[in-house]
Image (spheres, grey):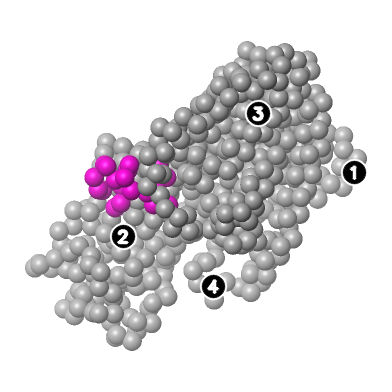
Amino acid sequence: MNGNAAAPLVRRLSALMAIALFGVNLYRAAHQSITTDEAYTYALYIGSPITGLFTKYEANHHVLHTFLCRLAVGLFGLSEFTLRMPSLAGGLLYLVAARRLCVSVFSKPWLAVLGMSVLTLNPFILDYLSVARGYGLALGFFFAGLALLCSPDEPAAVNRAQSWGGLCLGLSIASNLSFLVPCVALGAVVTAFGLRSGGTPGAGRRLVQALKRLWTPLLAPLLLLVAVPLSHAHKDNFRYGADSLRETAVSVVQRSFFHQYDVWRGETIPAGARRAWEAMADWALPGVLAITLAAAVFGGLRLIRTMGSDPPPGAADRFLPFAGATIGLSLGALVLAHRLAGVLYPIDRTAIYLVALVSVAFVSVIDRIQLGVPGRIVFIPLLSAVAVVSLIAFARGFTTEYYYEWRFDAGTKRVFALMAQRQQRHSGPPVRVGADWRLVLSLDFYRRMHDAGWMAPFDDRPTEDGGFEYYVFVRENQGIMAQSGLHVIYRDPVSGQALAAGEGR
């Protein structure tokens, strides 16, 4: 069965998956505690003069996302939910684009469901479809662009598809600069295949058309939105990354397949789990990548031979070569930038596009194998088992209690609420709260959000100096609390944070 004629049941099921996951994202955005990185974005760019959007650049200034966050908070007031609205919109776009792509690309209903599942059920990806960071918005625009650019090369639709696809890629980069590499790589792939399509006009004319249709809308958001803030960047703004691709692999394996473990407390992670993710990073992931890239090469050669034919190649024929070439070009560009300029490799969230692309491209390999490839009776069950085992691991890591990177912050909202409740029974000058540096920004976010006059603004004095009415500790520094003999009044079951009362409290 052709993917474009996918069974109505699959269309309905994929739509229900998207709706259900968007509901999960809404719940998380409304109920999960703010994280320190979100609070930092608020303090630096949203709760401060608007000129800072243009005159200050930090790595967490995901320009389009930051602009939209400021707009949402300005229109609807300050809360976790309003700050996360742009990310929720990006998450919805990602879910819609993933559904469209899977329904149009895969030739069997079960493969469409499998593709949709690996794209949307990974808890690592789900985190960024609601947390107020630019990755979810960038991922949504990137996959929208990919879906558009994989559309059949029909003369009546190609202009519109390339223009909108290029704009989506430009908006993806504007949402998060980490997406510069895959977006430019995808644009180059589409341009290169277009030049090989044959027919009229000639190659030179087709290149000019690609520059006008695809690259002009791709570059416009960068010039209009990103250029001015980025002009204030310096080298230290790009210090987050890995020294090797193995570190990249380990980070994405941890966050995708072992999401239930607390990375910030290594001693609590079973030794078997550590060995498993090391093996997956060293062997399984490179194996999946090699199979995917090899299949993409064969698919690309076949696509080149059929481009310009009547009827033109469909989305199913285009997707694996486009996705595989984008992955290969992205990795090549990252290696080259690292060796020539010392640019760090992506790590965890900055590699999220690779996780999504490789996942769905691997399912596309299964799809292509089942279409008459010798040995498919052996390969299909084996490769499908890899995908199914991945889904089982995703299910084990599913949560609505914390964001993996900021699990230490998961109880901050509850800690603040408990202090506020206790202060209703006390009067006097504003109380001073001593907190671990990782929690100061998120606690101050709630102070500003609730206009909590009972809490004094934070100063720079460390917790050890004492003299505070309340102390908030993360797991790692609770030894200080024990040595000081402080009275613990609350321990958060998710984050491990402890709230202790000072004298007279």
Mark 4 or mark 2: name the one nearer the start of the chain: 4
- Label 4 sits on a secondary structure element that is helix
Q: CA distance from mark 2 to mark 1?
A: 57 Å
Q: Quadrant of residue 158?
A: top right
Taking depth in this image into account, of 49 and 255 the one nearest to the observer is 49
- Label 3 sits on a secondary structure element that is helix
Residue at image location 55% in from the left, 37% down from the top: 142
- Quadrant (top left, top right, bottom left, bottom right) of the N terminus: top right
Q: Which residue is mark 3?
A: 191
- Label 2 sits on a secondary structure element that is helix
Q: What stretch of residues is rendered in magenta?
A: 43-63
Q: What's the amino acid at mark 2?
A: Leu
Q: What's the amino acid at mark 1?
A: Gly
- Eyeballing the image, is 111 above or below 463? above
Q: Which residue is mark 4?
A: 266
Mark 2 or mark 1: name the one nearer the start of the chain: 1
Q: What is the x, y in percent for residue 443? A: 29, 61
- In the image, farthest residue toward the front: 340
Q: What's the amino acid at mark 3?
A: Thr
Q: Is residue 327 magenta?
A: no
Q: Which residue is mark 2?
A: 441
Q: Which residue is mark 1?
A: 375
- Relative placement, left or right, of 157 versus 229 is right
Residue at image location 27% in from the left, 56% down from the top: 446
Taking depth in this image into account, of 22 and 353 the one nearest to the observer is 353
